[in-house]
């Protein structure tokens, strides 16, 4: 689905909501069946309980896919405001930190204090960052290191570059070109919509995202983000290296 197809996205969203209503009814009846077989008295009832539980799992997976698709399809009408990227990263570290520690992942950040403000829908962008951090966690099943760094890019027009680098298993050259393809996933149980959603969010911000990876060494995602107009003017008027941030925290 192309980002410029709002009517199709709205239609798809309505369809998914209708589907979720039926899934809710299905899930409720499966729960009632599971309760009926909660204490199986023979082999036949044990088989029935196993099958009901398997159906419950598949039903939940459909709900997960539906929710992920809604997030993917309905990325529009962004509330763009000048935002301190450093604060967004800090909020995400507070949120993701416990998960990272439990997975034995060390997180390092390098965010310059004089980083320009960027145009951002804060909540939507945090979803994009979370997808990337969860992707890194899944790539480092035995623990590792996640580095998050940012810098100002001096290209025209200037932008802010945000990079997330993990020390995970990496992505094979055959798979790498498909990581942003909707519904493509090499992970069992994955919906294949996490990275495509991140790409749509970044591009809806007027930015771009690239990925580089080496098998056995890790993966790097690089996001280029638009600088807020007031900050853009400051950058053009000041020599490189002397940029200061408005409204410093």
Image (spheres, rainbow, N blue to C red):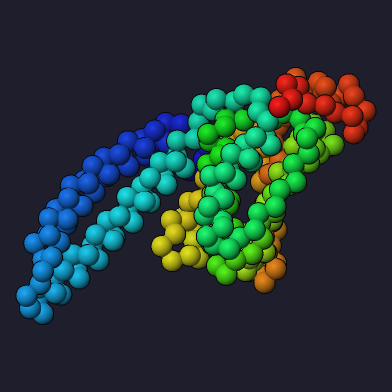
Residue that appears at 60% across and 45% down = 93
Q: Nearer the viewer, residue 90 or 84?
A: 90
Residue 238 percent across, percent down from the top left: 90, 24
Q: Is residue 161 above or below residue 211?
A: above
Question: Quadrant of the image for the C terminus?
Answer: top right
User: How many numbered marks does the figure carry?
Assistant: 0
Q: Quadrant of residue 190?
A: bottom left
| Residue with the most extreme left position | 41
Residue that appears at 71% across and 44% down = 162
Residue 181 visible within the image: no
Residue 147 percent across, percent down from the top left: 70, 54
| Residue with the most extreme bottom position | 43
Residue 4 percent across, percent down from the top left: 52, 34
Residue 144 visible within the image: yes
Q: Is residue 201 left or right of residue 58?
A: right
Q: Quadrant of residue 57?
A: bottom left
Q: Nearer the viewer, residue 146 or 74?
A: 146
Residue that appears at 22% across and 46% down = 24
Q: Is residue 8 left or right of residue 160?
A: left
Residue that appears at 41% across and 62% down = 189
| Residue with the most extreme right position | 239
Q: Is residue 112 above or below residue 186?
A: above
Residue 63 percent across, percent down from the top left: 32, 50
Q: Is residue 57 left or right of residue 179?
A: left
Q: Nearer the viewer, residue 87 or 155?
A: 87
């Amino acid at each position: 689905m192309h980002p410029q197809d709002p009517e199709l996205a709205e239609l798809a969203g309505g369809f998914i909501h209708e589907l979720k209503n039926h899934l809710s009814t299905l899930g409720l009846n499966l729960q009632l069946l599971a309760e009926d077989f909660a204490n199986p008295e023979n082999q036949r009832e044990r088989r029935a309980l196993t099958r009901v539980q398997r159906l419950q799992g598949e039903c939940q997976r459909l709900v997960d896919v539906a929710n992920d698709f809604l997030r993917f399809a309905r990325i529009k009408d962004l509330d763009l405001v000048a935002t301190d990227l450093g604060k967004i990263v800090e909020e995400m570290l507070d949120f993701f930190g416990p998960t990272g520690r439990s997975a034995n992942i060390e997180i390092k950040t390098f965010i310059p204090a004089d980083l320009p403000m960027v145009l951002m829908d804060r909540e939507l962008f945090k979803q994009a960052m979370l997808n990337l951090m969860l992707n890194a966690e899944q790539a480092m099943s035995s623990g590792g290191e996640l580095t998050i760094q940012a810098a100002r890019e001096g290209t025209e027009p200037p932008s802010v570059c945000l990079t997330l680098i993990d020390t995970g298993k990496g992505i094979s050259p055959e798979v790498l070109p498909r990581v942003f393809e909707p519904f493509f996933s090499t992970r069992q149980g994955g919906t294949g919509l996490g990275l495509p959603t991140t790409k749509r969010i970044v591009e809806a911000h007027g930015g771009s995202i690239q990925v580089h990876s080496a098998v056995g060494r890790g993966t790097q995602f690089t996001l280029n983000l638009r600088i807020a107009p007031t900050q853009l003017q400051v950058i053009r008027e000041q020599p490189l290296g002397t940029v200061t941030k408005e409204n410093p925290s």
